Amino acid sequence: MGCFFSKRRKEAKGGAQGGAGQDPPAADEEKPPPQYSWDQRAKVDPKDYTFSGLKDETVGRLPGKVAGQQFVIQDCENCNIYIFDHSATITVDDCTSCRIFLGPVKGSVFFRDCKDCKCVVACQQFRTRDCRKLEVFLCCATQPIIESSTGMKFGCFQYYYPELALQFKDAGLSIFNNTWSNIHDFTPVSGENNWSLLPEDAVVQDYVPFPTSEELKVIRISTDTMKSIIPITRGGRQKSSEESCLAVFFAGDYTTANARKLIDEMTGKGFLLVQTKEVSMKAEDAQRVFQQSASDFIPLLEKGPVVALEFNGDGAVEGCRSIINDVFSGTKVFASENKASASQDVDSFYNFADMQMGM
């Protein structure tokens, strides 16, 4: 950079470096300042990424309007707030009686000093502090944490609009990594429970209604469980049967579509989806999880992460293997061989996955 400016200064002196045919610049002529790439970036106005001090309003941001920036929501009362885009982090402070939708958040969502709010949230990390009576339909890649919070209720994220799948990718979130019911209470109280699960039949729209403003009504939303971007899992709810089955898809062009297809087929037959996980595996991991059949799958691990599904219900193993044979005959899929081994399959895989993801 120093040499560049030195050259310009030399050229400005009496045309000594500029050639005989050039006129020297006028004495009062100002040169434009040098332009750098960082000067040409769009300036970020914090007001565009903040909702503050609102009451009885419906506000939001459409897809593309947040585009991975941080967002702040604070001091709002009885508002409907919608962030239909992906963001870096979101803090929600001192809000009361609000309905809030937060699209995929690459980092953390932090609620502080909030009460009587109903929310739909997708994020990498979820935390609350000094909150009371929050009801949250959650997708969280890591273990959600509550601190000094009471009356908290959680359900599985279920939401759809056309741009949402790409927003999950932009935020670096997998639709199969959702620990919504695995809550860690930093400040438990002996003899009390600061959190619980929402009813299984809870309807998202009854908690966070669709937006009614003209600006936001253009978003084509569905809360139909069959359309949800995130597979609906039972999480920590009691299983209906002692029989579970583990199915694992390996990386390829249609991994997500195949996993979704198996979920639809199995749940359509009355089996329950307990949990899902997307994680990378090494050969030694496969040896522990897949045991005798590991050699069939180890070459596939180099292609990328695997997607695992746990189904529950009487006859789950037979039902799952039958569907895989009929629908995915040309695809390599691991499935528990029998009821006796299935429980160990599930425990081995998810214990590995939890350690891999630091949970």
Image: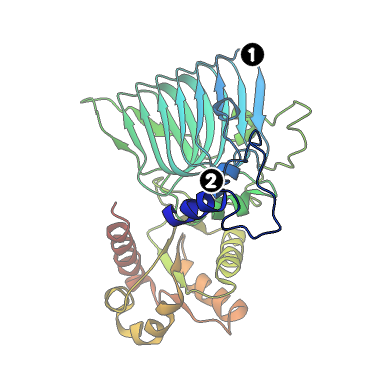
Residue 73 seen in the current view: yes
User: As rendered, which of 192 and 214 lies closer to the eye?
Assistant: 214
Q: Quadrant of residue 64?
A: top right
Residue located farthest toward the bottom when viewing the structure as drawn: 295
Residue 231 seen in the current view: no
Q: Which residue, given by chain and number where applicable, does mark 1 sit on? A: 56
Q: Quadrant of residue 301?
A: bottom left
Q: Residue 290: image x %, image y %?
A: 33, 77
User: As rendered, which of 356 and 232 lies closer to the eye?
Assistant: 356
Q: Residue 123: image x %, image y %?
A: 47, 43
Amino acid at pointer 2: Trp
User: As rendered, which of 51 and 100 lies closer to the eye?
Assistant: 51
Look at the picture and state if 60 lies above or below 172: above
| SS category of the residue bearing label 2 | helix
Q: Which residue, given by chain and number where applicable, does mark 2 sit on? A: 38
Q: Residues within 10 Å of mark 2 (few under 14, many from 20)?
A: few
